[in-house]
Amino acid sequence: MIIETWLPKILAASGSLAAGVVLLAGLSVGARFAAISASAMCDYISPAADQPRSPQSRKTPPRTAIGVCAELLSGQQPTETAAGTGRGMIAAQAALRMRGIPYSWGGGGPAGPSLGIGRGAQTRGFDCSGLAEYAWAKTGARIGGDTSVQWKTGIHVPRSQIRAGDLIFFAYNTANPATIHHVGIAIDAIRMVHAPHTGSTVRIDTWAGVPSREREFIGAVRPR
């Protein structure tokens, strides 16, 4: 298993996400994020065109987002103080720096993008699990290059506690981890950076509130 650019608002969120985000995701986050530099730029991608949005999510203002993405891109010292968050920030930053790299089936690993296999044999890039492996290798963790291994590589965290760097998994049958087919790296509880499919590139997408993603969301893992 193997853009819209905008200047985010300066926010100092604590306790839960802003109301518009709550409408989109239907969840809250206990993690706290500090205000970020006004000069920090961040890409914000709404749900992909091939992923239908629910009527509820269409009501959400398109630029509603917390500042964690810009904080990650700015290279600042992580502001969350919970144990393990620093490593997650490093992983998320590493994945974000790969935006624009082509998707390549079977491509990518700890050293970065590589030629894939099969339909990815002529493309230097990442598939979803290759990007995850690369991102966490930057923290010194070895999580393997396949989603089935990555699913077992850390602690499973409740959806309400997802934070930057956590691995977000999707399965054809959410009752059966053997059907996991995709993984992304969390930016926050709403969005992820991932390598979606052949013909795409590494990018940021919203997953929370997107019906196709919600149906397949099986859980989140925080690598050890």
Image: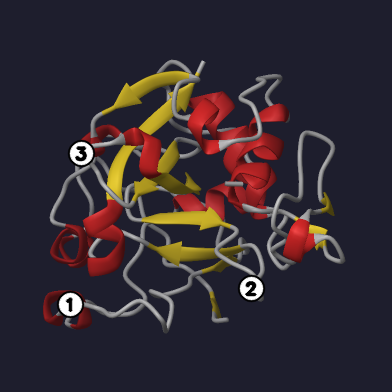
Residue ID for mark 1: 54
> Considering only order in the chain, which callout, 2 or 1, is on the residue closer to the N terminus?
1
Q: How far separated are the C-alphas under marks 3 and 2?
A: 35 Å
Quadrant of residue 18 within the rendered picture: bottom left
The answer to whether 129 appears left or right of 19 in the picture is right
Q: Which residue, given by chain and number where applicable, does mark 2 sit on?
A: 200
10 Å neighbourhood of mark 3: few (<14), some, or many (≥20)?
Answer: few
Give residue 79's position: percent from left, percent from top.
Answer: 48, 33
Using a 10 Å C-alpha cutoff, classify the residue at mark 2 as few (fewer than 14 neighbours), some (14 to 19) or many (20 or more).
few
197 lies left or right of 75: left
x and y, in percent, of residue 190 in the image:
33, 55
Q: Residue at x 33, y 24 (%)?
A: 156
User: Mark 2 or mark 3, which is nearer the start of the sequence?
Assistant: 3
Say which amino acid is labelled 1: Ser
Quickly name the residue at label 3: 15
> What is the C-alpha distance between the residues marked 1 and 2?
23 Å
